[in-house]
Image (cartoon, rainbow, N blue to C red):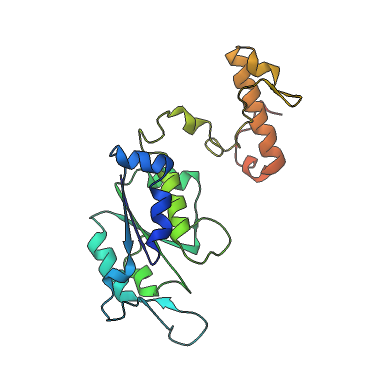
Amino acid sequence: MRFDLITLFPRMAEGYLQESMLGQATKKGLLEIGVHDLRDWSQNKHKTADDRPFGGGAGMLLSPEPLFHSIEEIATPGAEVIYLCPDGEQLNTPLVKELAQKEHLVLVSGHYEGIDQRVRDALVTREVSIGDYVLTNGTLPACVLIDCVARYVPGVLGEEKSLTQDSFHDTFLGFPQFTRPAEYRGMKVPEVLLSGDHAKIAAWRREQSYLKTKERRPDLLENSDTEGHQ
């Protein structure tokens, strides 16, 4: 799977994308990740990529010219062009799974007051937000999206079973997990996890997931099948 990130701050992304799971998956050839400096497509001598908005107002906007040139050069036929912005659709597990079916994602990081609307109208195919808050630019949200989507690319996680234990995979939040030692500072691991009875362990985990979700995110239960947990 191919990811390309267009940003004014490539160094913000490069370190993150070269580490841990993403870095290993790239080395193995499971992922291709390109990070591009938007200024490389600027046509003026100062290599600026922004300007004042028509109509006045605070801040600056990313100009259409470098964005059009960069996206048109990088995007392959059928690529999903995603603009990371606070007013986009919420990033969640169903959306991540949908994006993981794509062969190529081009991610556009906004800055200042955003990007020229003509880019959004003509080239952007999807607008995504990682939450109801505002960051200084869209580079970190783009890294978050890459991280989420990459987990669904076969072979990236190594142990695919990890996906089925994630929070939100089946609506419920994740269950508590423990490792050695079985007792630490007077705190003991639940006996059921030491029993070797896999059916009982699975039932305990389902129950704990339900209880945590009911306490912390009851909204997730509204549209889920909670039969057997009452």
Instruction: Choose between 147 and 210: the one closer to the eye.
Output: 147
Residue drawn at x 45%, y 48% as measured from the top left: 95
Q: Quick check: 201 left or right of 91?
A: right
140 is higher (above) or lower (below) than 122: above
Residue at 68%, 36% (x, y): give it. Answer: 212
Considering every residue shown, the one lying at the far top of the view is: 196
Residue 125 lies left or right of residue 187; in this view the side is left
**Picture coordinates of residue 73 (x, y %)?**
23, 63
- Residue 14 appears in which quarter of the rendering? bottom left
Q: Position of residue 45 (x, y in %)?
A: 27, 81
Q: Position of residue 162 (x, y in %)?
A: 48, 30
Quadrant occupied by the C terminus: top right
Farthest-out residue, right: 186
| Foreground of the two, 174 or 44 | 44
For the point 47% across and 33% down, the residue is 163
Quadrant (top left/top right/bottom left/bottom right) for the N terminus: top left
Task: Identify which residue, 100 or 20, lies in the foreground.
Answer: 20
Does residue 34 sit above or below 150 in this rendering?
below
Tell me if residue 182 comes above or below residue 94 in the rendering: above
Residue 32: x and y in percent read 29, 47
Q: Quadrant of residue 67?
A: bottom left
Q: Judge from the rendering whether residue 183 lies leftward or rightward of residue 65; answer left or right.
A: right
Q: Residue at x 58, y 62 (%)?
A: 133
Residue 60 vertical placement versus 138 (above, below): below
Q: Is residue 158 visible?
A: yes
